[in-house]
Image (cartoon, rainbow, N blue to C red):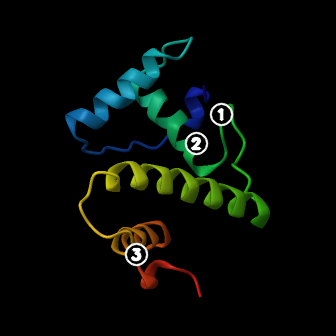
Amino acid sequence: MPTESALSERFEMRASRQWIASVDNWRRAQPDLPSRGEAIRRLVELGIGRGVSASPVAKPDASARASRRSQAEKIAAEQIDRVLKNVDQPEEVKDKRKRRLTKGPAEFRKP
């Protein structure tokens, strides 16, 4: 926790009840039960990478991203197969729909 002299600026904000409940749930899970203000300070520090107890997340390399993308496509294809199994359409139509769903629209794909 920062020293009292380090906390010289006042900051006010508005938030939804659901957001505040999320913050309260997080702070209750902490071993020292910080105040709501302290919990928000910690979460902001974690979010901007100067973490109280965490370091910034390293960006995965290209091979790791490709592996995750491949795994996601495989899982998506399996789920689509389950859904399309009972659809009364020719296999060519099902394959085309599956391909479009797994690859996504052209505007979302990288060149």
Residue 105 picture quarter: bottom left
Whether residue 61 is visible here, answered yes or no, is no
Residue type, label 1: Val
Q: Residue at x 59, y 88 (%)?
A: 111
Residue 99 in the figure: left or right of residue 56: left
Image: 105 above or below 60 = below
Residue 32 picture quarter: top right
Residue 26 in the figure: left or right of residue 71: left
Mark 2 element type: helix
Quadrant where the image shows the N terminus: top right
Measured as percent of width and height from the top left, residue 41 is found at 50, 36
Mark 1 element type: loop
Q: As rendered, which of 61 and 37 lies closer to the eye?
A: 61
Mark 2, residue position: 45
Q: As rendered, which of 90 and 62 lies closer to the eye?
A: 90
Residue 40 picture quarter: top left
Between label 3 and label 2, give the one nearer the viewer: 3
Q: As rendered, which of 12 and 110 lies closer to the eye?
A: 110
Q: CA distance from mark 3 to mark 2?
A: 46 Å
Mark 1, residue position: 52
Mark 3, residue position: 96
Q: Residue at x 29, y 27 (%)?
A: 21
Neighbourhood count class around disc 1 (C-alpha, 10 Å): few under 14, some 14–19, many 20 upward: some
Query: How many marks on residues?
Result: 3
Looking at the image, do the residues carrying marks 2 and 1 touch, with CB atoms under 8 Å apart?
Answer: yes
Image: 47 above or below 108 = above
